[in-house]
Amino acid sequence: MPYELQELAAISGMPGLYRLVRAARHGVLVESLDEKATRTLAPARNKVSLLSEISIYTQDADETVPLTEVFERIHQKHGAASPVTAKSSESELTDFLASVIPDYDRDRVYLSDIKKLASWYGIVSKHRPYVAAEAAPAAEEAAEADTAAETPAPKAKKAKAPKTEEPAAGEPLSTGGVIGTPDEAPTAEGNPEAAAPAKKSRRKAE
């Protein structure tokens, strides 16, 4: 995004552009986007139009161009200084917009809209720094690449962990599978079944 428009707004009944500061009880506290940066209260009855939510109609009824993209196109073609102002002639203004959005809707975009666009771009480009669109994504991609390179390390440790817990020779795999070793010399006292053959032999002898 070349110019950050998220907090900027045009307010009905108030000239210029404003930065939204915070909501107030009877309206919105705003700061003028100029050298003075004067703070004032915009009454609740005034309509607040966020620049980030404004788009330009095109000849395709289902497609519009967001103002952020329009500003990007203007900067790429004309730089920070707009070739027109709100006082430019009608032909100059329409030619200006056509050079930026060739397929803009001539019926739904009025001359007053183009004048606002020229005025807003002049204010924003003067008081807001331009940020190249490639700078931020490049930094994000580098950070993601570093993170992706580090992620296999924990997996390798987890794979090695079972090896350290492998049972030694003769050790049962789990306590649930252990079967107690029988007594080497079971006696009649410890094993009732051991006394049974003795009783049978006595009967035969009788």
Image (spheres, helix red, strand yellow):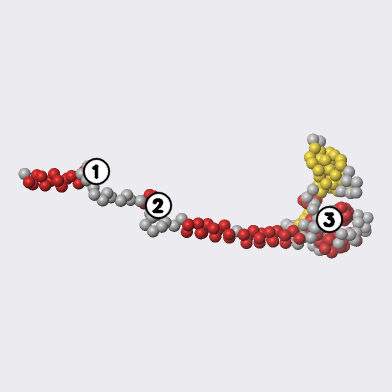
- Amino acid type at circle 3 is Pro
The mark closer to the camera, 1 or 3, is 1
Give the Cα separation between the discs numbered 1 and 3: 93 Å
User: The disc labelled 1 sits on which kind of residue?
Assistant: Gly
Examine the image and state in which quarter residue 46 appears: top right
Q: Left of 187 or right of it: where is 7?
A: right
Q: Nearer the viewer, mark 1 or mark 2?
A: 1
Badge 2 amino acid: Ser
Q: State left or right for residue 194 relative to residue 165.
A: left
The mark nearer the N terminus, 3 or 2, is 3
Which mark's residue is nearer the viewer, 3 or 2? 2
Residue 105 seen: no
| Label 3 sits on residue | 129
The numbered disc on residue 32 is none
Residue in the image at 38% along x and 54% along y: 172
* Badge 3 vs badge 2, beta-carbon distance below 8 Å: no
Mark 1, secondary structure of its residue: loop
Please provide percent x and percent y for residue 205.
7, 46
Residue sitting at x 85%, y 39%: 41
**Rendering coords of residue 106 (x, y %):** 83, 59
User: Between residues 96 and 71, which one lies in front from this camera angle?
Assistant: 71
The answer to whether any part of residue 154 appears in the image is: yes
Nearer-the-camera pick, 163 or 5: 163
Please say if 14 is above or below 106: above
Looking at the figure, which quarter contains the C terminus?
top left
Q: Disc 2 on helix, strand or loop?
A: loop
C-alpha distance separating marks 1 and 2? 28 Å
Instruction: Tell me the residue that label 2 is attached to.
Output: 174
* Snapshot quadrant of residue 191: top left
Mark 3–mark 2 distance (CA, rounded to whole Å)? 67 Å
Q: Pointer 1: what residue?
A: 190
